[in-house]
Amino acid sequence: MPESDYYAYQEYSTPTPQPMARRPSSPKYTYYLIGICIAVFILQSVYPLITEYFVLSPAFILERPWGIFTSMFLHADFLHILYNMIGLFIFGSVLEQQIGSKNFLYLFLLCGLVGSLGYLALADTALIGALGASGAIFGVIGAVTLILPNMKIYVQGFIPLPMYAAGPLYVLIEIFYLRTGGGGGIAHSAHVAGFFAGLALAYYYKKNSPVLKLNQVAFALAAVILLTIAVGYAKFPNTSGAKIISTCISSSDSDLQLQGCVMRAYNSADPQTQSQIDEELTNLLRKTG
């Protein structure tokens, strides 16, 4: 998420009374999620293989399907986790105290999974994975937009906007980058998908029941996970070329070693796999400029 997303003040008008779940005295699940992400980031720093095996990887969607879920707790570097955790604290703490801790947790996880679904559906290469909590956080932002539309935040640190204006602005910026290919290295598709999932869940919450039932949540989680795996496999039915390149990247300490590894694998591969390697390398060069 961009740095500007995180300068906000928790000042908002009292919303129209709605049947709400019991409000927690403190946003404990927000703190738990922040703590989990920080702990996982420390483990990533000590054991780099954690990132490789728990990231959302289109190339390994069948071999490592858990990445659909676990990737939302991974982060690429210090600034990545810093901005995400600030955003989670600002928006998550407000939302949790409005809808209740369990509902907040369900919403966070479902939006994170829908973010993974959005990433796989719109990815143009199986070689580039995704990680980070921002898909789920954009879901939280979407929910805050609907439940607390008058909450004021400060975009860029000094432009005051109510959430009914700031929320759409955030997602329109993400859609713009998604369409133009700007903001490289960011999973804009996951942000957009997560935002609209948050809107939908907040709408359901306000219109149907103040407490989401556990069996409903379990069904929704299972459905999104299965759909995400199916979409990933349908989008990338044969990923042998991407797997070869990914394995070479993981095992190489320099560009020269990487080139040698890919060339050896290419020369020993069958024509179909060679074609897939060519395609993935072309897509990778296009993505990285």
Image (cartoon, rainbow, N blue to C red):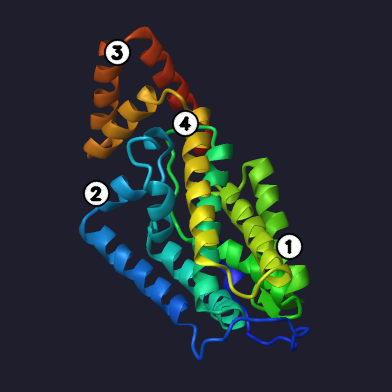
Amino acid at circle 4: Tyr
Distance Cα–Cα, label 2 vs label 1:
37 Å
Please, which residue is most extreme toward the top here?
A: 271
Amino acid at circle 2: Leu
Question: Which is more foreground, mark 3 or mark 4?
Answer: 4
Is label 4 in a helix, a strand or a loop? helix
Image disc number at residue 269: 3
Residue 139: image quadrant is bottom right
Residue 86, compared with residue 277, is above or below; it is below
Q: Residues within 10 Å of mark 2 (few under 14, many from 20)?
A: few
Q: Residues within 10 Å of mark 1 (few under 14, many from 20)?
A: some
Residue 172: image quadrant is bottom right
| Residue labelled with disc 1 | 169
Residue 65, compared with residue 267, is above or below; it is below
Position of residue 209 measured from the top left corner of the image (x, y, whole percent)? 66, 71
Please, which residue is most extreme toward the bottom here?
A: 25
Image disc number at residue 121: none
Is label 1 in a helix, a strand or a loop? helix
Asked if the residue at tag 1 contacts the one at tag 3, i.e. Cβ–Cβ closer than 8 Å, the answer is: no
Tell me if 35 is positioned left or right of 158 in this view.
Answer: left
Q: Give the mark nearest the N terminus, 3 or 4.
A: 4
Position of residue 87 measured from the top left corner of the image (x, y, whole percent)? 54, 72
| Residue labelled with disc 4 | 233
Distance Cα–Cα, label 4 vs label 1:
33 Å
Asked if the residue at tag 4 contacts the one at tag 2, i.e. Cβ–Cβ closer than 8 Å, the answer is: no
Amino acid at circle 3: Ala
Distance Cα–Cα, label 2 vs label 4:
24 Å
Is label 3 in a helix, a strand or a loop? loop
Which residue is found at the position 49% from the left and 67% from the top? 84
Image disc number at residue 49: 2
Residue 153, compared with residue 62, is above or below; it is below
